[in-house]
Amino acid sequence: MTNDLKRSQLRAIQYFYADGSCEFAFGLFCLLLGVYFFVESHVRGWLSLVLDASLVLVVLGGAWLTNRLVRQLKENITWPRTGYVAYTRQHGLRRRIRVVIGMLVGGVVAAAAAALIIDPTIHVATMPLLSGLLLGLVLAILGWRAKLPRFYLLAGLSALAGIALAFSGIENFSGLPIYYLGMSLVLFASGACVLRAYLRQNPEKAGDSDEQ
């Protein structure tokens, strides 16, 4: 019975990612950050200080927009075709995952700081590196949680992009918009492929929308 419940929960989790809405949401978030860092890298003086202070608002606003995007996609595309599925969340597991993520993030930041302290002349764009590794970590956790290989591929691309930019000789604030804008295109492309496959497998039947 326990195995049946686990399989049912896994199917429910995979169903959440079956329409590509997660990739579109991450892509939108990366696009917002890419535009933000691009503008920030081209302004100086008091305007730069204002932009620095508004980063928290950009992140919070981006989180709100991505949640709205996922909701709209599911309400207009997914649920009318294959219905609404919910599952009981395991709060203890989520707490453990957050602890692990926090430890890994702290380890990456500490390693980058230690490398710069040991050799201050090293020219590594740490911000694109950290961005690539952290987003890659998040995508890898999604892949592990949902048992979906495509997230491992996206995680690898994110990490490789961050490493490539880190050692390319480019400056931090030039590498950040390149990374985030590039990853937004990758995530949008992945989401479009997944959504196309989903729509092909689940065409909307006449009258379904009214019944839903």
Image (cartoon, helix red, strand yellow):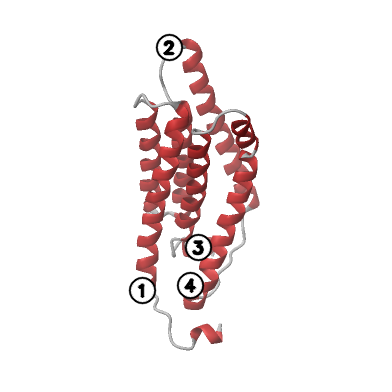
Mark earlier in primary sequence (2, 4): 4
- Do callouts 2 and 4 mark residues in contact (Cβ within 8 Å)? no
Circle 3: residue type: Phe
Mark 2 sits on what residue? 121
Q: CA distance from mark 2 to mark 4?
A: 52 Å
Circle 2: residue type: Thr
Q: CA distance from mark 4 to mark 1?
A: 13 Å
Coordinates of residue 117 in the picture (x, y in percent): 51, 13
- Residue plotted at (42% across, 39% down): 179
| Residue 77 circle label | 4
Q: CA distance from mark 1 to mark 2?
A: 55 Å
Q: Residues within 10 Å of mark 1 (few under 14, many from 20)?
A: few
State the SS at label 3. helix
Q: CA distance from mark 4 to mark 3?
A: 12 Å
Mark 3 sits on what residue? 16
Circle 1: residue type: Gln
